[in-house]
Amino acid sequence: MGFFDSLVDKVGNAIGMDLHAKLGEQLQTLLQPDTIQAIVSKADEAGLGDKVRSWVGKGENLPVTPDEIRNILGNSEVQQLVAKTGLPADTLLPALAHFLPAAIDKKTPEGEA
């Protein structure tokens, strides 16, 4: 099961509970070095590599917008997440924009993916 499939399952399980806390916890569990590298690669393709690298590096995390998360993931991934979770994109993307930078930062304390 890929990263995004796992994320969908975990977000789906969190619905009805404290979504923010559950999403933050699940991102910590799911983010592995190969997943982080894949996100960096997708961000590079979207022209957002510097932002994502700030989350991996030791400095300050640059913020990301929901639209930038959509650009990193791609429309097909976003639609897949929406379909599987039942959450509208305007709920899911802001949550990811909020939690993903900090989650990646915590998983890369030495500044490396």
Image (cartoon, helix red, strand yellow):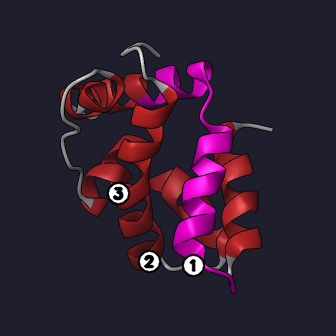
Q: For the stretch drawn in magenta, what is the main secondary structure?
A: helix
The residue at which mark 3 appears reads as 97
- Residue 44: % across, % down: 29, 24
Q: Is residue 23 magenta?
A: yes
Is the C-beta separation of discs 3 and 1 under 8 Å? no
Under circle 1, the secondary element is: loop
Tell me the crowding category of disc 2: few under 14, some 14 to 19, or many 20 or more residues within 10 angstroms, Cα based.
Answer: few
Residue in the image at 57% along x and 78% along y: 87
Which of disc 1 and disc 3 is earlier in sequence?
A: 1
- Residue 110: % across, % down: 41, 14
Q: Amino acid at mark 1?
A: Leu
The residue at which mark 1 appears reads as 87
Query: What's the distance in space between the residues labelled 3 and 1, CA to CA?
Result: 15 Å
Q: Amino acid at mark 2?
A: Thr
**In which quarter of the view is residue 10 placed?**
bottom right
From the viewer's perspective, is residue 17 above or below residue 101? below
- Residue 112: % across, % down: 42, 13
Under circle 2, the secondary element is: helix
Tell me the crowding category of disc 3: few under 14, some 14 to 19, or many 20 or more residues within 10 angstroms, Cα based.
Answer: some
Tell me the crowding category of disc 1: few under 14, some 14 to 19, or many 20 or more residues within 10 angstroms, Cα based.
Answer: some
